[in-house]
Image (cartoon, coloured by chain):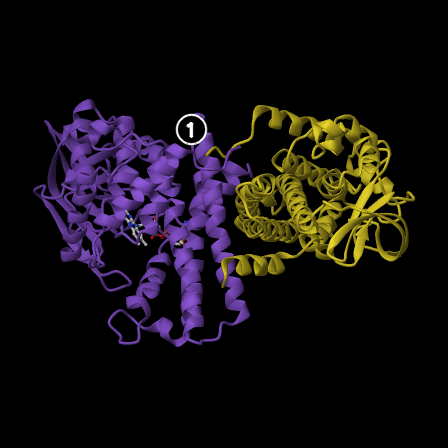
Chain colours: A purple, B yellow
Amino acid sequence: MDLELSPRHLEFRDECRSWLAANKPARPLRSMDTAAGFEEHREWERVLFDGGWSVPGWPASYGGRDCDLIEWLIYEEEYWLSGAPGRVSANGVSLLAPTIFNFGTQAQQDHFLPKMASGEHIWAQGWSEPGAGSDLAAIATRAIRDGDHYVLNGQKTWCSRGAFADWIFCIVRTDPEAERHAGLTYLLVPADAPGLERRPIGRLDGEPGFAELFFDDCRVRVDNVLGEEGQGWAVAMAAAGSERGLNLRSPGRFMAAAERLTELVRTLRAEQREIDPRRRDEVTDAWIRAQAYRWQTYATAARLMDGAELGSEASLMKVFWSELDLELHATALRLLGDRGELAAGAPDAVDGGRWLDGYVFALSGPIYAGTNEIQRNIIAERVLGLPRR
Amino acid sequence: MRFSFTEEQDMFRDTVRDLLADVCPPDAVRAGWDNDDGRVPGLWPALAEMGMLSILAPEEDGGLGMDEVDLVRLLEETGYAGVPDPIMEHVAVAVPALAEAGASGHLAAAIAGETTCTIALTGGGDYVVDAEGADLVVVERDGGLVAATEYRVEPQASIDRSRRLGKLVAVDSVDPLSGADPILANDRAALGTAAQCIGVARRLLDSTVDYVSERRQFGKPVGTYQAVKHHLADVRLGIEFAAPLVHRAAWSVAHPESHDVTTRARDVSMAKAMAADAVDRACRAGLQCHGAIGYTDEYDLQLWLKRGWALAAAHGDAPSHRDRVADALGI
Ligand SMILES: Cc1cc2nc3c(=O)[nH]c(=O)nc-3n(C[C@H](O)[C@H](O)[C@H](O)COP(=O)(O)OP(=O)(O)OC[C@H]3O[C@@H](n4cnc5c(N)ncnc54)[C@H](O)[C@@H]3O)c2cc1C
């Protein structure tokens, strides 16, 4: 047990901190769920890349700096604490990249990873369908082989920023005869593929952050298969742990929100507003939970660095961070009282309505990346070993 | 930065776990209810022999010279086994206080297991665990600690029959423990209790998982039902995220050179708040998922239910510890 940062780690933290302070955008960017905001966020990805900070955990040959997990966690803490923008590249970096590292051919790695690191390719996830939500294996979009192409027909939905992305990583059905989980293939689809039509859908916050994708005899080259044809389920699930666990939502983000929450209490006090003792208790509880997520993650990181794999335990993390995020934001809104309702642009909105935006987004946490009901099923059956039937 | 225990620490934990499974099964805990002192015969000498009583005593005093990081996982095991003896009070608080005060006579007897110590600290409320059966009480008074060896006790029945509570009504003979820090003693007591809460919660979870996997209704195990699954997933979540805070707090207490008093208080209180909530959740879900059998005194679940309720509140309940965290945060 050693819970102090080593001199090397302290130096790393300072380097990271000063780079972010010097380079982060002076003003908040527009929402990445709009066409214009998406491009602003892409430019920020490029700045990060040029500074060597877009994918610090990757090998240097692909634009990273070979950070170990501890350094990566430190980086994430610094990143979110600095108030830098959200990461428009997150879906690709946290969910697709581990899969490319594991299953991609050399050619795929060499082609896709540097472009992902620089923001030239921003990726969207095309898994869900109208008939395949929690039951992902019900995927019905077909991809039928025709020479050196697949011909895709079907529909994807809830594709985050799918209307603006350059590439989409999809799971499609290549063998309609095979039993559910068999017959699926992981396929990388360029957004400009002929026969692919994308239609934005407004999200709860009103921004066009979702997209529906319609495939109408859409042709995609077979060398865009990731892993083997028919192995799509295994390939996708190998990375599902990264989505649920620390890759997608490291503690830094929630620690930063928890700090802002305590700062909000201090600000309200300075404005001579009274803080109900129950609110103080809730703020503290949320702050403690952010710390709990942090230390649980460091313990997990130590196991991973010893060669263990993040298995079903990722479900514990997913439930915890998503409910923590909600608690942080709901508490802030209660603290704000009647100002909690004020949207961005309202003259009295606190901090540009950021707590409300954050709350609305946090509401989706228990739904995406596998709903929390599904995660609790996994915890019960695979972590605790309760009987399935 | 490396958040993990060493192989030696794992081995020590396993040894203690095996010993407790052997010497302190539920029947032995129950048998203690009808003893004079409520304790398990033979357990104290066995713990002394393996060094458990002297973990926080320096090597030059004949102790193991280990620290709180070594200790917390052993205390988790004592919670898991439902140990009725005042092990936390003795090992985590009294022994280091005696050592820090240079009370070598009391210390030697305590780590040899010849005596049993308990504690009466301001953070622990009025009722002292095992006051009657103990030989020495570390009492907090006038901003310091003293070792009381002659005192009178008014017994107070606890819901947990293993916890022989008593109020100190008179203290007749004391040795001052100058050099021992009462604030640190209170933090150690809260930390040790938090560790025991984790163990109790784990035991409740394991017992309940076993039970619902066997018990059948509507033609299948009740553990197949999602409502039951989700209750138990929540218990697991509570433990999963409380335990690292307990280990982290142990590190803070063990490393005064890098943790000032406010930071230590904050870390200990985070641990106790989360551990208390975790065990409380485990108690409720454990009982609910057992149904009526869990509501009997015949069935062993009650040992951990009652211990869980008691320990969740002992040395500060969750809200009072959150209050301390809030103070440390300056909000
Ligand atoms: C903000 C946001 C972003 C998203 N981004 C993407 C994206 O980029 N790409 C993509 O592919 N998808 C994305 N999704 C979709 C997401 O993956 C799905 O919403 C999710 O898998 C749940 O599917 P569903 O919405 O169809 O709900 P359903 O599966 O219909 O579930 C409805 C309710 O029933 C419950 N339920 C279902 N089955 C069970 C069961 N077996 N046991 C207990 N309860 C059950 C669910 O928990 C839920 O409460 C996104 C969703 C959101 C909200």
Does residue A177 show up? Answer: no
Q: Is residue B105 above or below residue A274?
A: above
Q: Which secondary structure lies at badge 1?
A: helix
Is B20 left, or right, of A72 in this rendering? right
Q: Is residue B324 above or below residue A216?
A: below
Query: Where does label 1 land, which residue?
Result: A305
Residue type pointed to by label 1: Met
In the rendered image, residue B95, in percent from the top left (x then y), is placed at 75, 39
How busy is the neighbourhood of tag 1: few (under 14 within 10 Å), some, or many (20 plus)?
Answer: few
Depth order, front residue of A263/B283: A263
For disc 1, the chain is A
Q: Position of residue A386 (x, y in %)?
A: 56, 39
Q: Indicate left or right for B331 with A234 as reference.
A: right
| Residue lying farthest to the left in this orientation | A194
Q: Choose between B219 and A343: the one closer to the eye.
A: A343
Q: How many marks?
A: 1
Q: Residue at x 76, y 50 (%)?
A: B145
Residue, x 83% and y 40% (percent of image)? Answer: B116
